[in-house]
Image (cartoon, rainbow, N blue to C red):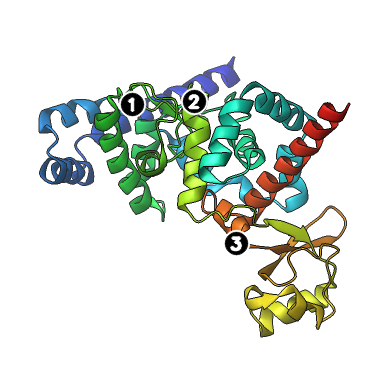
Amino acid sequence: MLVRLIVFSFSLFIFTTHALADELFIHSPEVQEFINQMVKQHHFNHNQLMTLFSHVKIRPTAIQSVKMPLEKKPWHSYRKLFITDWRIQHGAKFWKKHEMILAKAEKEFGVPASIIVATIGVETKYGQHTGDFRVIDALSSLAFSQSPRASYFKKELEQFLLLSREQHLAPLEVMGSYAGAIGQPQFMPSSYRYYAVNFSGNSRIDLSHNEADIIGSIANYYKQNGWKTHGPVTIPASLQSSQFQFLSKEKQPWHFSQLDLAKHGIQSNAKTFLHQDTKLIELQGYFTKQYWFTFHNFDVIKRYNSSELYAMAVYQLSYYITKLREKEKNG
């Protein structure tokens, strides 16, 4: 009984603390300054913003989640989360279901359908997990926190309000991730505004339910960030740890062609891209370290998420989805 009372009292304390934080939020000088800036710079209505922000709920879990991203895991653990039979099989099904629109996007933007499909698979499991945070709550919690990235999230909050006005969205109803990413592609508000395209021809862009807009927007994102049509992404490299350490400290591998690297005894079984500039990366496998040549398009994927683990997961998932699709066609 005493234990239950202590737990109840603690829960009540947490609830009261959060409720008080929500109530005080709107009166914070920093929030007031932000509201005034939106009124002055973007001509929002002051009273409407005051009403909007009075409904914001502070989400401490958003702040904690940003501090502990999955990308801090070693590659062998990270890979298990994304290169799964389920994601491969459902990726092939998604491709088959939306084959025509994927082909159209690949032709128009020059980005492989496999990369588009894999991106959706890694981001939201093909739309199954798009986030259970109200975007305005997540962005406000992060923007006005002590996070070293608070200024970034404040800019994204600004972009979200502009996006809501432009796309006629109800800002208190838009759901997303703990970081404020929206829809199946998990676009941050700035990316939504700058890269989302109306690929369906409907009255507005819908990145949550309209697969044509989702596919076209991801393809446009990669194209606008410099995707090279038919260019390589990454291939395995054969070398020793000492060779990698030497090049990392004494050289800049991204200025080397594979022919140059071969002079240092670094080889790859793939001969197609021998004359292209490359970079070497090291990933922690379960038993040993893995080494890969990465090319320009690998860095383009990293514009979506700056982690090498993320880019490798997208690439490998795209590879296995393609292999399954080929097997089913030839089956």
Crowding near pointer 2: few (<14 within 10 Å), some, many (20+)?
few
Tell which of 290 and 30 is nearer to you.
290
Residue at which label 2 appears: 132
Mark nearer the N terminus (1 vs 2):
1
Q: Quadrant of residue 255?
A: bottom right
Q: Is residue 126 visible?
A: no
Residue situated in front as seen by the camera: 261 or 208: 261
Q: Nearer the viewer, mark 3 or mark 2?
A: 3
Element type at mark 1 = helix
Q: Position of residue 203 (x, y in %)?
A: 33, 21
The residue that label 1 is drawn on is 19
- Residue 170 is situated, as x and y percent measured from the top left of the image, at 30, 22
Residue under label 3: 296
Q: In the picture provided, is 89 more to the left or to the right than 206? A: right
Q: Quadrant of the C terminus?
A: top right
10 Å crowding of disc 1: few (<14), some (14-19), many (20+): some
Please name which of the two marks, 1 or 3, marks the residue nearer to the observer: 3
* Depth order, front residue of 205/68: 205
C-beta proximity under 8 Å, tags 1 and 2: no
- In this view, the residue in front, 266 or 162, is 266
Label 3 residue SS: helix
x 22%, y 46%: residue = 30
State which quarter of the image contains the N terminus.
Answer: top right
**Disc 1 to disc 3, C-alpha distance:** 48 Å
Q: Amino acid at mark 3?
A: His
User: What mark, if any, has residue 170 been given in the picture?
Assistant: none
Q: Is residue 134 left or right of residue 256?
A: left
Residue found 60% across the figure and 33% down from its top: 103
Q: Is residue 296 above or below residue 310?
A: below
Of the two numbered discs 3 and 2 on the same chain, state the one appearing first in sequence: 2
Circles 3 and 2 in contact, beta carbons < 8 Å: no
